[in-house]
């Protein structure tokens, strides 16, 4: 739904603490600026932890939260695998999303991301 804001959480495969390595964390962070990911959504804020990622994502017209999260995972996994000279999964298949449905949901979600 256009304009809907989602609080998204996704973990690394097997909850490996890949992002405890500063260089890998930087590669993941840099990949978030790829325009391909955000053609139908806006990244409002995010937090990268050693084994997971939190974000507030606002959908635009035609956007699907599943499609956006899959693009985040795909783009970042390719960049990380290229850096590590590996192949295979970086992210767990599943992710959790919670719509911010009330007027204050956006601020509550942003506070949740900042506290993580």
Image: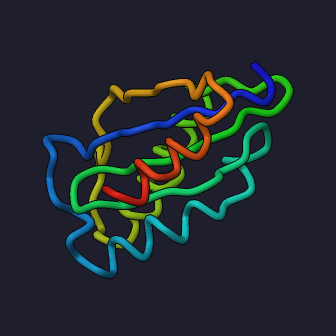
From the viewer's perspective, is 21 left or right of 54?
left
Query: In the rendered image of this protein, does residue 50 appear above or below residue 67?
Result: below
Location of residue 81 in the rendering, given as x and y in whole percent from the top left corner: 35, 61
Q: Is residue 100 left or right of 48 when viewed as pictured?
A: right
Q: Is residue 46 above or below residue 102?
A: below
Judge from the rendering whether residue 35 lies leftward or rightward of residue 44; answer left or right: right
Residue depicted at x 40% and y 66% = 82
Q: How many marks?
A: 0
Pinpoint residue 24: horizontal percent, then vertical percent: 33, 72
**In the image, farthest residue toward the right:** 61
Q: Residue furthest top?
A: 1
Residue depicted at 38% across the width and 27% down the height: 96
Q: Is residue 15 above or below residue 47?
A: above
> Residue 94, how many percent across, how many down?
33, 26
Q: From the image, which quarter does the C terminus lie in? A: bottom left
Query: Outermost residue, front direction?
Result: 104
- Quadrant assignment, res 28: bottom left
Viewer-nearest residue: 60 or 110: 110
Q: How is the image coloured?
A: rainbow
Question: Image quadrant for the N terminus?
Answer: top right
Residue at 68 percent of width and 30 percent of height = 103
- The residue at the point 81 percent across, 33 percent down is 60
């Amino acid at each position: 739904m256009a304009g809907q804001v989602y609080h998204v959480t996704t973990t690394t495969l097997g909850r490996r603490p890949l992002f405890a390595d500063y260089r890998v964390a930087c590669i993941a962070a840099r990949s978030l600026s790829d325009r391909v990911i955000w053609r139908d959504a806006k990244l409002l804020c995010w937090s990268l932890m050693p084994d997971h990622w939190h974000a507030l994502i606002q959908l635009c017209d035609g956007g699907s939260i599943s499609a956006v999260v899959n693009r985040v995972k795909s783009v970042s996994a390719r960049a990380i695998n290229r850096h590590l000279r590996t192949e295979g999964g970086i992210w767990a298949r599943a992710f959790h999303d919670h719509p911010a449905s009330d007027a204050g949901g956006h601020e509550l979600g942003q506070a949740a991301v900042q506290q993580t």
